[in-house]
Image (tube, coloured by chain):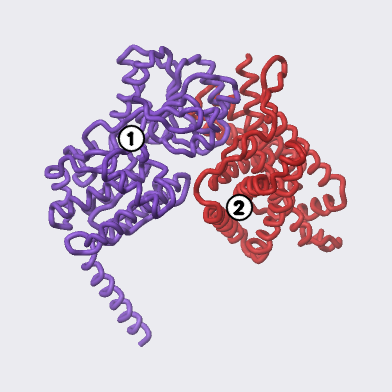
Chain colours: A purple, B red
Amino acid sequence: MKKLLSLVAGLGLLLGTSALAADTVKIGLMGPMTGAWASEGQEMKQVVELLADELNQKGGLLGKQVAVISEDDAGDPRQASLAANRLATQGIVGVIGTYGSSITEATQNIYDEAGIIQVANGSTAIRLSEKGLANFFRTCPRDDEQGKVATATISKLGHKKIAILHDNTSYAKGLAEEAQANLKGLNIPVVFFDALTPGERDYNTILTKMKAAGPDFVFFTGYYPEAGLLLRQKKEMGWDVPFMGGDAVNNPELVKIAGAAATEGFLFLTPPLPKDLDTPEAKSFVAAFEKKFGSAPKSIYPVLAGDGFRVLAEAIKGANSVEPAKVSAFMKTALKDFPGLTGKISFNDKGDRIGEVYRVYQVNNQGDFVLQP
Amino acid sequence: MEQFFQQLTNGLAVGGIYALIALGYTMVYGVLKLINFAHGDLFTIGAYLGLTLLTSLALTDHVGGFLGIGVLALMVMGLVGIIGILLERIAYRPLRESPRLSAVVSALGASIFFQNAIMLVYGAKFYVYPQDLLPKSPVFIFGMPVPLMRILILVASVVMMISLYLFVQKTRIGTAIRAAAIDQGAARLMGIDVNRVIMIVFCIGPALGGVAGMMVGIYYGQINFTMGWNYGLKAFTAAILGGIGNIPGAMVGGLLLGVIEALGAAYISMAWKDAIAFVVLILILIVRPTGLLGERVAEKI
């Protein structure tokens, strides 16, 4: 009898949830809420939930409310595949995220097999969109784009002996190899090319070895925790070679880790920072975010996640359907020059964002990030 | 040649920290035959407590850098020592008579608990120690500039290791610890309060780990809640390399691991640094399965 009762209760629950499902449009969010990139993931959640609230106040989508279902990928491929499997069973139209390329890569096939749209916000590795997955999109640019901007910047500055350092993640290695190939094409010699182990504290060994190769410019393609330590330890060594970073160093924590004195003059490539976004959409969004959370978003990737959400919402509206195939087709063909928070958004056949997104920034002696003309 | 010595000091600085953390693993293993996987997280707690005390008490402003940091280090040691004792009471003592695997699972659980507790209390972002605590000027050794902090860390590590060694070898409590390490039952029959010995071990080990965390914070500046995992793993390796359960072994293992890493990265390949270190570990364990100093004082602490 007890068994029967619990069976009935269980069925009731099931029916209950599926009845609820019909009333909302569900959109997933997968981000690193814990782990080393937790500050990015937690802000992604704030951004997307803020935008969802705004959308719901305006009446939601297709006459229904939008529900955001968040899962934590912990910045770890194994956790991410578990998170993706959980999300895939919840009837979502699409998922926003995630930040790291290697993390996104671990989940692409899961979403593809479930027929769910994925809009990555920080995963710039080239091969992610070269797999022919129909439902994969990204609001961030690709590494080859960044590699081109990096090489152009280096050759414009006139440096002759370049050291390239990555951290063996899909993203950093891809960007490093791209830059190396481009520099070779321009006959600028790369005197040092190697990887560090992320998550450590002491990079003196690497700096000592790199210094022995005698570069006049260093391009580090990894993330801000390591970049901060490298700059700090480089300063302590008394080595004043100019450093440039890729877009993963774009986080104010970098200056806190290294100290303003060690970061002065540091260059990096990135999509524009939230404070430098000049579209009306971006300004009202940053104002709303400040009102709710007390400060502007610290990093651009959560804002790109917000763009992912807005694009997906626009496409659901435009396709007048929650069927992923139709929404995806709309995003590739009908959606052109959508006014995103980070500029105009269109996608090509591969799901990559079209258009120039990267800018060059330099850190000044106050530790502020200044957009270079 | 200059690069070689530079890399050697790089390796010794990292190795000194490994050694200090490895002492905690080795002491606990010596007495309980338990790998305390939460040790790396106690190290992290030390780093966070150090920062909290440093910024809230502003001791270094009143009594100067060196004295202030010395006092703070003692406070961190005390606090992390207490956490270590609580950890043993709550997570390990109830499992003392259970199969060894239960305690290992409990240790892993404690590790996950600590890591997430730190994240929830302090937040997921990186924390940064103040930069100007101690003079930055380098000291010249054979005409080679070596940062003062690096020498201080190495000296502090060695002093703590030697005092621990003397404590275990020369004092009554130390003798009791060694007796409990050899045979808990026999030690109890000889009138040694084994529970108290275990409590002391769980105070000293975490205290050393905690102060290592604070030293890492002061030297490298940046701390976050996941830092204990990496250091814990390396220190555990160092303890095995030197012969787990053996205090001089942990010191030798730690310094050696740091130097192997630095030289391997400098002269073979940087990306293969960890692989090289572990290959060396495997080779040493094939030749000496009990670690470098494991046999000389077999099964003892």
Q: Quadrant of the N terminus of chain B?
A: top right
Q: Which residue is mark 2?
A: B38
Which subunit holds the residue at mark 1?
Answer: A
Q: Please say whether residue B61 is visible from this viewpoint.
A: yes
Observer-side mark, 1 or 2, equals: 1
User: Toward the viewer: A58 or B69?
Assistant: A58
Which amino acid lies under the numbered mark 2 shown in the image of this protein? Ala
Identify the residue at image location x=41%, y=16%.
A190
Direction from residue B60 to residue A66 in the image, left or right? left
Q: Which residue is mark 1?
A: A271
Position above or below: B267 against A275: above
Q: Position of residue A91 (x, y in %)?
A: 25, 61
Answer with the quarter of the image where residue B218 lies: top right
Identify the residue at image location x=37%, y=53%.
A45
Label 1 residue SS? loop
Which amino acid lies under the numbered mark 1 shown in the image of this protein? Pro
Answer with the quarter of the image where residue B194 lies: bottom right
User: Toward the viewer: A160 or A135?
Assistant: A160
Q: Position of residue B107 (x, y in %)?
A: 60, 56
Which subunit holds the residue at mark 2?
Answer: B
Identify the residue at image location x=51%, y=39%.
A199
Position above or below: A207 against B301: above
Label 2 residue SS? loop
Q: Residues within 10 Å of mark 2 (few under 14, many from 20)?
A: many
Direction from residue B161 to residue A6 in the image, left or right? left
Q: Residues within 10 Å of mark 1 (few under 14, many from 20)?
A: many
